[in-house]
């Protein structure tokens, strides 16, 4: 599975639980998903990567889920957030 496939699935998961406003936020989530992929790809089961790609969060085993959560925390320091856009 490619990093792009994983990050697109991750974007879909995020969209299920949060509102994504605009292309900048979408691109941020994709970059965030790519960072997570880089940190977990050799540490979780292949089936877990596929589950994220296929948007099946509730079926990820607890060990792999913990690794994903840790990667999310780590990636917060590496992926720059989009700048807020002003609305009038």
Image: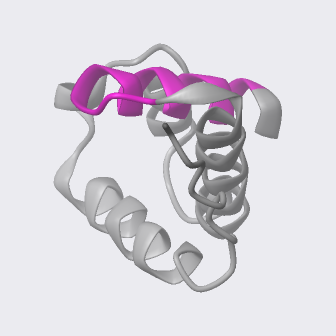
- The stretch of residues the image draws in magenta is 5-20
Count of numbered circles in the view:
0
Q: Residue at x 66, y 49 (%)?
A: 28
Q: Is residue 38 left or right of residue 36?
A: right
Residue 53 vs 82, above or below: the answer is: above
Residue farthest toward the front in the current orientation of the protein: 88
Color style of the picture: one colour
| Quadrant in the picture for residue 5 | top right
Would residue 55 be found to the left or right of residue 81 on screen? left
Q: Quadrant of residue 32?
A: bottom right
Give how far across and how far down residue 23 sits, in percent: 69, 28
* Residue at figure coordinates x 56%, y 48% from the top left: 86
Q: Is residue 6 magenta?
A: yes
User: At x 49% / y 71%, what residue is drawn?
Assistant: 71
Where does the image place residue 12, in percent across and percent down from the top left?
47, 20
The dominant secondary structure in magenta is helix
Any part of residue 60 in sight: yes
Q: Is residue 15 magenta?
A: yes
Judging depth in this view, the residue of 64 and 76 nearest the camera is 76
Quadrant of image for the N terminus: top right
Q: Is residue 2 visible?
A: no
Question: Quick check: 37 above or below 80?
Answer: above
Q: Residue 38: x and y, percent?
A: 73, 62
Q: Nearer the viewer, residue 40 or 13?
A: 13
Q: Residue furthest top?
A: 54
- Left or right: 10, with 33 as reference point: left
Residue 45 percent location from the top left of the image = 50, 46
What residue appears at the point 40 percent right and 18 percent down from the top-left corner? 55
- The quadrant in which residue 35 appears is bottom right
């Amino acid at each position: 599975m490619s990093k792009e496939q994983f990050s697109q699935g991750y974007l879909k998961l995020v969209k299920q639980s949060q509102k994504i406003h605009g292309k900048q936020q979408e691109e941020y989530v994709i970059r965030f998903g790519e960072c997570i992929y880089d940190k977990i790809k050799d540490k979780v089961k292949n089936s877990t990567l596929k589950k994220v790609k296929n948007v099946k969060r509730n079926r990820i085993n607890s060990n792999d889920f913990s690794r994903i959560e840790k990667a999310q925390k780590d990636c917060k320091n590496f992926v720059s957030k989009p700048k807020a856009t002003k609305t009038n």
